[in-house]
Amino acid sequence: MNWDWGAVADFMPHFWDGLLVTLQALVLGSLISFALGLVWALLMRVPTRWVTWPVGIVTEFVRNTPLLVQLFFLYYVLPEWGLTFSALTTGVFAIGLHYSTYTMQVYRAGIEAVPVGQWEAATALNLPLRRTWTVVILPQAIRRVVPALGNYVIAMLKDTPMLMAITVLDMMGEARLFSQQTFRFTEPLTVIGVAFILISYLASVLLRTLERRLVR
Amino acid sequence: MSVDTEKNPTDVPAPSTELIRLENVTKRFGENTVLDHLDFSVNAGRHVTLIGPSGSGKTTILRLLMTLTKPDEGTITVDGEQLFPAPEKQIREVRKKIGMVFQQFNLFPNMTVLRNITEAPVTVLGMSKDEAEERARGLLDLVGLGDRCDARPTQLSGGQQQRVAIARALAMRPQVLLLDEVTSALDPELVAGVLDVLRDIARSTDITMLCVTHEMNFARDISDQVLMFDSGRVIEAGPPEKIFSDPEQDRTREFLSAVL
């Protein structure tokens, strides 16, 4: 095995393009999964089966089928129904949707962990239900779940190479393309491997800072 | 048994308007009947203490009045308006007349002390933020915590938290204050501060108080009426001097000798 710094230099312009795409997928995918997961979690608390059953079935289905299958489905089947999105848009949505079925369980646990006395105090003060959720329950629940949500951000980062399967040129896609054209595998794969570690590390530092600020 | 048939023990004439009435109220938890066709009423301005062995239904009465739980049968009326059974909108209206202080304080840990007190007056009563804060500061002074407005509940001792909780309940200007074993979770040396505050409030306002407590001194001190509960019924009622020194029921005597 020989290491060629020239190949690294040749790869770098492609790397930066890929990095940008990976970060976009990660940030947007995270935001979608955080928002959608909260929506699922709240819908599961609506006291009627007409809501909880459909939501339960859909999220259970999404959680228990592979992300790769979902990516293919959204990218190749939806256009047959007249819904066409760019590969990156589809990928971001798929990751966000897939992980929202995990974050919903994190939120559920966080909401259930708020002591029942908080609900009772809100009732005793006659706070409307919506206000009870927005100023009493959710701020306490979300504070509790930040570390768990952070773990899913890291997991999502490690799943972004799957977007390659639907032609998105993320870091992995760029590395693969570069390898096929130049027959250099070691350098591009090593570069993106290091990049994944660095992003994971930075993300966890960021989350720990956030955690410390929230837990006062 | 009805409280308003009892003679007022102090020389202050008893206010005669009935504020709270429970009629024929039954509450079951599974197999266990906690309240069994209870009739119970409290007149405005009274300070009533409920005593009795645990599981006798004292706390359940407070929780029914705060609408934290619903009776299986019977009606509950507060200030002439029905609290149960009633439509949600009416429950919200009637509930404004009632405030509650909990054994575990239940302050909102994500808010400052001041915000804990102003949140409900602003959102529920529609008070302006400035007015609510001014009143909150006044109430914090009253409970001896005027300098802790910006503290978080977790930075306070249990006794301080409970005094904030009292201020928070009073900020809603309730006609009735429900006190559910408010000193039970406190370290012994912190109990006195909370009791002092409550004694002050009992003396200086015309608020009606309904307390569940195991502090017999507190019961003796602030209440003008003591009700002895057993198995979901009031078995004896009277002024504290009478109940504590010369109870009529054997069951009451037994209970008192166990706790005093």
Image (spheres, helix red, strand yellow):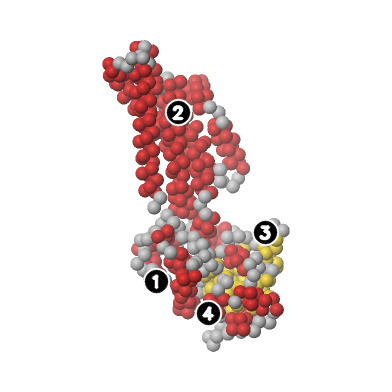
Residue type pointed to by label 4: Asp
> Which residue is depicted at the point 50% across and 22% down?
A72
Question: For the residues marked 1 and 2, what is the alpha-carbon distance in whole angstroms?
Answer: 56 Å
Question: For the residues marked 4 and 2, what is the alpha-carbon distance in whole angstroms?
Answer: 67 Å
Same chain for the residues under marks 1 and 2 in the image: no
Disc 3 vs disc 2: which is toward the camera? 2
Residue B146 lies left or right of residue B11; in this view the side is left
Among the 4 quarters of the image, the one containing residue B54: bottom right
Give whichever of A138, A197 is nearer the camera: A197
Question: For the residues marked 4 and 1, what is the alpha-carbon distance in whole angstroms?
Answer: 20 Å
| Residue at disc 1, secondary structure | loop
Q: What residue did someone put label 3 on? A: B29
- Vertical position of residue A211 compared to residue B63: above or below: above
Q: Position of residue A100 (x, y in %)?
A: 49, 36
* Residue A57 visible: yes
Residue type pointed to by label 3: Phe
| Residue at disc 3, secondary structure | strand
Same chain for the residues under marks 4 and 1 in the image: yes
> Which residue is depicted at the point 66% across and 82% down?
B247
Residue type pointed to by label 1: Gly
For disc 1, the chain is B
Residue B221: give its label.
Answer: 4
* Label 1 with label 2: CB-CB less than 8 Å: no
Residue B149 lies left or right of residue B6; in this view the side is left
Residue B144: give its label.
Answer: 1
Q: Position of residue B181 (x, y in %)?
A: 55, 68
Among the 4 quarters of the image, the one containing residue A207: top left
Residue type pointed to by label 2: Asp
| Residue at disc 2, secondary structure | helix
Q: What residue did someone put label 2 on? A: A159
Q: Earlier in the sequence, mark 3 or mark 1?
A: 3
> Which residue is depicted at the point 62% across and 84% down?
B245
